[in-house]
Amino acid sequence: MKVLVIGLGISGCAVVEYLLDDGDEVVGADKVIKNRNLNCEIVSDAIDFGIFDFDLVVVSPGVRLGHRLILKAIAHDIEVIGEAELACRNIPNIVVGVTGSNGKSTCVSLIAHALNCSGINCALLGNIGTPLISDVRRLKKNIGDIVVAEISSFQLETMKTKAFKSSVILNITSGHLDRHETMSNYAIAKRNIGYCTKNDGSFYVGEDVLQKYGELFLGLSPIVTESAPIAICKDLGVSEEMFFSALTTFKKLPHRLQFLGNVRGVNCYNDSKATNVEAVSYAVKEIGKDIVLIAGGRDKGCDFSVWNSLFYGKVKNIILIGESKKIIANSLNNEIDVTFASTLKEAVQKGLQVAKKGDNLLFSPGCASFDMFVNFEDRGNRFIMEIDDESKRDCIDSCVY
């Protein structure tokens, strides 16, 4: 089989390696041509193939479906799928799928932790870090292992196999409108996880999802749940007693309202995983008051004006960074002091300058990280480093004086 793989990021490279191991002929296409240690032909994704003689096209999640090579494949009646779909066609194990705008990583991590604590082996894969396709061969040798997969809306756009024993849409809030354009399109992409759930499986949705988008789920018979981890774990044989026992040893993931300590009397929080306005809103509600907020990054089409009413009486200052800083500033009223910073280091320094003793410095960007950082982890780690540096400087200053 001859396969074109479009997009050679982490998942694209994993697809290439899998296909090559299967003996397929593979051509990789990407915007940037560089040595990725892949034993296949690599071309620019702007190439105009003289003969488009591929049997299959596999597209990475970050590649829009309007890409010219994808449209060419469709015009030639060639199937286009994504890495997650390719993996699900080849995984013989029980698979659980979790999607949503916020909380996906925490949910899948909690499910995996509860399973492991209950003596059930599982593999935590997907959008949380390791591509599904990377573990297919090992899983085939360990059929008893359960796959717990975090699935993004980008991955769901190209999924069609009924792979999931249990699946859930945790929530649908504004995000990725730069790609999906409308909330309806975004919800439809998320909905696809229901169509990819086995006929005898369980498809769960959060109550808010059904209230807002109920008409989209006609014929899918979703089950409303207040606690997806508990419901899914029950499906997999974990009792509530076992689940709550596991919960006592579950450690919160980093970059999610992560308390870093106190610098000059200011409480510092790393919430780099907050990539949309709702995630920031949640963080502000949790902290409650006396907040100096550092936000900004690459805009995903969010409506930042919703912060005006929510931040009133809670957020004292906002320091804005990244590509979207002017967009955010123009969306806010004059009730909150707004300052621009060119770097995260400058933002931290300004934040600690304006914050008073007892205040809370919250890094919750509400945007994607790709304008200044590799990903949200890199962004969060950089914030941690800056806070550590300020803490050390504070210690040195106190020792000197």
Image (spheres, rainbow, N blue to C red):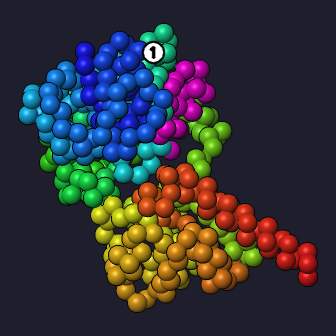
Q: Is residue 277 left or right of residue 65?
A: right
Foreground pick, 195 / 348: 348
Foreground pick, 385 / 357: 385
Q: Which residues are magenta?
A: 106-129
Q: Quadrant of residue 113?
A: top right
Q: Is residue 233 left or right of residue 271?
A: left
Residue 210 position within the rendered picture, expressed as x and y whole percent measured from the top left: 25, 49
Q: Quadrant of the C terminus?
A: bottom right
Foreground pick, 118 / 134: 134
| Residue visible at 50% across and 83% down in the picture | 339
| Residue visible at 67% across and 65% down in the picture | 386
Above or below 235: residue 184: below
Residue placed under numbered mark 1 in the picture: 137
Extreme-top residue of the structure: 141
Residue 49 position within the rendered picture, expressed as x and y whole percent measured from the top left: 18, 33
Query: Is residue 119 visible in the rendered structure shown here?
Result: yes
Foreground pick, 66 / 115: 66
| Residue visible at 43% across and 44% down in the picture | 104
Residue 391 position within the rendered picture, expressed as x and y whole percent measured from the top left: 76, 68
Q: Is residue 92 left or right of residue 67?
A: right
Q: Amino acid at mark 1?
A: Arg
Residue 12 position within the rendered picture, expressed as x and y whole percent measured from the top left: 38, 33
Q: Quadrant of residue 301?
A: bottom left
Query: Is residue 99 visible in the rendered structure shown here?
Result: no
Q: Quadrant of the N terminus?
A: top left
Residue 117 is one of the magenta-drawn residues: yes
Q: Quadrant of residue 7?
A: top left
Residue 142 is one of the magenta-drawn residues: no
| Residue visible at 20% across and 31% down in the picture | 80
